[in-house]
Image: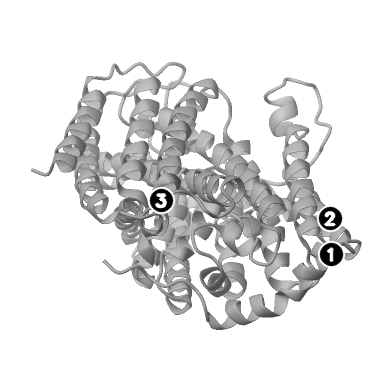
Amino acid sequence: MNPTLRSLFALGLLAASGAVLAAPDLGQATKQATNYTAIVMFAVFVILTLFITGWAAKRTRSASDFYTAGGGISGFQNGLAIAGDYMSAASFLGISAAVFANGFDGLIYAIGFLVGWPVITFLMAERLRNLGRFTFADVAAYRFAQKPVRMFAASGTLVTVLFYLIAQMVGAGQLIKLLFGLDYGYAVVIVGVLMMVYVLFGGMTATTWVQIIKAVMLLAGASFMAFSVLAMYNFSPEALFAKAVEVHSKKDAIMGPGGFIKDPISGISFGMALMFGTAGLPHILMRFFTVPSAKEARKSVLWATTWIGYFYILTFIIGFGAIVLVGTNPDFKDAAGKLLGGPNMAAVHLAKAVGGDVFLGFISAVAFATILAVVAGLTLSGASAVSHDLYATVIKKGQPAPGSELRVSKITTVCLGIAAVFLGYVFEKVNVAFMVSLAFAIAASANFPVLFMSVLWSKCTTRGATVGGFLGLATAVGLTLLSKSVWVDVFHNETAIFPYTSPALFSMTVGFVGIWLFSITDNSPRAAIDKAGFEAQEVRSETGIGASGASAH
């Protein structure tokens, strides 16, 4: 056996054995028996993906291979990988739980996440592929002074990635406590170690295939659940909804909006964060550099939108299925009548209701695999921001020593992995919902405005992009800290200073206005160069002339 494969295989067995030997201490969570079926299925997934990582390691020779798989991923494969990156455990468990609790209102997440894709399809995908090489900063800084814009882009990327990572790591720990009956610490360490292995050895090639496999598993599992539920009602959604209204405590209210977000400003702001945040998430934007051409980039968005749209329809059916099959079954509730393991377990309990213990094990393994795939993508985008944007371009002024950029990215991967495990421990008992919404709000308020204005507005300048971007970033973080999610729930103050659910409506406005204001008032010699460079940028973004192609293997 190849030495790399042998060492990866050993790591897989170590992770699996760590899972089996872990004590089922669930802390404050409802204690669940150790689910050996889930552990075996997860171990199979880990070993399979580690073999793929060993195969990918042989193909990862250059920075291009590491960051973008050499641009050799097809549109269909990339579409599945984007879907795998996007369909997180928060989507699968969170949306179905929101539907289980509130009915129709749970759709705000699904619709918000989905409608971001037309923005990417028509405004971003082709231009990203034609202008960029490794990171979205390549696109944002195309005609600007490299140092300030890349420093902003790296800051926006790292802040978004860290908040998203915290949410995924804490989610992993809590999920595994409930699904596998494992100790929180074991789960966080296993996710951290496997994430580092995928990225360190296999780079984007391994990460892509982990995401594709996980997407296929998740789509298959969710399809089986949804079709099993519909089959009980002769494939009549109307009959399913009627039964749900009959058995739910809120009765007819579950079929209408208004129970989740109370005021219009919060509704608009929350929707904007979900919709425009998608077009600013660095690990999603990075995927457009893995395809060989702009045509394949458009194709990958089409496929991603298809799979993601289909998946969110399934989560809606799963949520209503949980209302009628889980909500009415005392086996899934504790003595107080609450759902075993908490409200986010609705989809997992439905898996047992429709497919027994074996299918429950499969869905549990898929949930963990989901977190692994998303975390690997996040880590890679964070590592590339440090090594490509900061080290290679800012510090070494575009002239790094051969092999040094790749070395820095691998060191950053290890640092991010250790930081993710540490932060997972620190934030164990904190509600992480606000961290996910903060990641989307920051992406929508900082990354998206800079990307949008730099590509589409000819009068945008280096100063405008940098100052406006940092203003959007600071406003998003500041208003979130002052909102109920943090100011009241974390810091235990009586009332929130910022009264709305999401800062995006305000922080996005600050970002766009900042870029506009500081650009039109910029009369420096650099501003003249920035504006003069727009025509050449537009030609390349529309035609792809001069864009980097796929690497030969």
Tell me the quarter of the picture where residue 172 sits: top left
Amino acid marked by disc 2: Gly
Q: How many marks?
A: 3
Please, is residue 440 above or below residue 412 in the view?
below
- The amino acid at mark 1 is Pro
Q: Which residue is mark 2?
A: 514
Q: Sequence order check: which comes first, mark 3 or mark 2?
A: 3
The residue carrying mark 3 is 402
Q: Residue at x 73, y 20 (%)?
A: 492
Q: In the rendering, at what x and y percent does residue 438 appear? A: 65, 42
- The circle on residue 473 is none
Say whether residue 422 is left or right of residue 490: left
Write down the residue under mark 1: 525
Q: Residue at x 67, y 58 (%)?
A: 448
Identify which amino acid the numbered label 3 is placed on. Pro
Q: Between residue 359 and residue 57, name the one nearer to us.
A: 57
Q: Badge 3: how crowded within 10 Å, few (<14), some, or many (20+)?
A: few
Kindly tell me whether residue 105 is visible in this rendering: yes
Q: Position of residue 210 (x, y in %)?
A: 31, 51
Asked if residue 189 is positioned above or below residue 402 in the image, the reply reads above
Q: Quadrant of residue 349?
A: top left
Quadrant of image for the N terminus: top left
Secondary structure state at the residue bearing disc 1:
helix
Q: Which image quarter: residue 69?
A: bottom left
